[in-house]
Every structure is written in C-alpha cells, then in structure tokens.
Image (tube, helix red, strand yellow):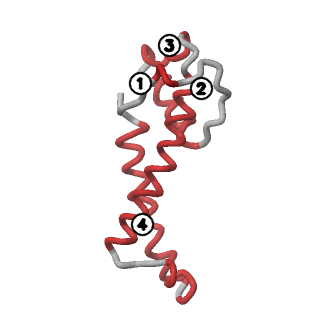
Amino acid sequence: MNGFDFHALTANEPAQFGKYGSLRLRYLKENKPTLYQALLQGNLLNAHLNEIDRQAHEMTEQILQQLIRSEHFDESVKLSNPILWVQKMNPFKDIAEETVMRDLIYC
C-alpha cells in the first residue's frame, strides 16, 4: 500500500497523528473496515496513522515548493507584497491538499 512498510513500525507507537492521520482514521473506519480491523488487531493502527500524517505533511510541502518554483514565485514576494503572496499561496495550498487527499488519505 503506497510503499508503506508495516513491518518497520513499532507496535506500541503512541498516537501522535494530526489532521491527516485523523482524516485517514475516519476514512478507514467508514470505507475500509477490513483494513482498519487488521491494523487495529495487529497493533499497527497508530503507527500507520502517524506515518500517513508524516507523509502527508511532507508531500504537501513538496507540492507547494514545486508550485512555487513552477510559477517563478519566491519568498521575496512575501515581504514586498503580502497580499499577492496570500493570493498566490491559497490556491497552491488547495492544490497540494487535494493531491494529498486523493493520493494518500483516500486510497
């Protein structure tokens, strides 16, 4: 599943997941109950959710950086024209989040 190595995880890893881990948890419960139960019974659920959350944050940042580079947009705009920065960054963040949801959370 997405290159995720369940055997490399610690079974008793504490739940530290945030937004994306919580979204993944809800998705598993509602749409993948068999996988949810298998992860739960194998004591891998928290580790899975922590890893998904970590990967989602990393992926979001990578996508944002790619979008910024592709538009030849950089941090200097943030200082010189904050309104333009926000106008550009909001759609970039939306694109990054939609991609993460499609490719990592809801799969």
Alpha-carbon neighbours of circle 4 within 10 Å: few (<14), some, or many (≥20)? Answer: few
**Residue beneath disc 2:** 46
Kind of residue indicated by mark 2: Asn
SS category of the residue bearing label 2: helix
Residue receiving disc 4? 91
**Residue found farthest to the top:** 41
User: Label 2 vs label 1: CA separation?
Assistant: 18 Å
Left or right: 92 as drawn, with respect to 12: left
Q: Residue at x 52, y 37 (%)?
A: 23
Residue under pointer 3? 37
Disc 2 from disc 3: Cα separation = 12 Å
Residue 31: mark: 1
Q: Amino acid at mark 1?
A: Asn
Residue 67 sits above or below residue 103 on the image: below
Q: Position of residue 37 (x, y in %)?
A: 50, 13
103 vs 36, left or right, is left
Which amino acid type corresponds to the residue marked 3 in the rendered image?
Gln
Element carrying mark 4 = helix
Amino acid type for the residue under numbered disc 4: Pro
Which badge, 2 or 1, is on the more N-terminal residue?
1
Badge 3 vs badge 1, beta-carbon distance below 8 Å: no
5 versus 52 height, above or below = above
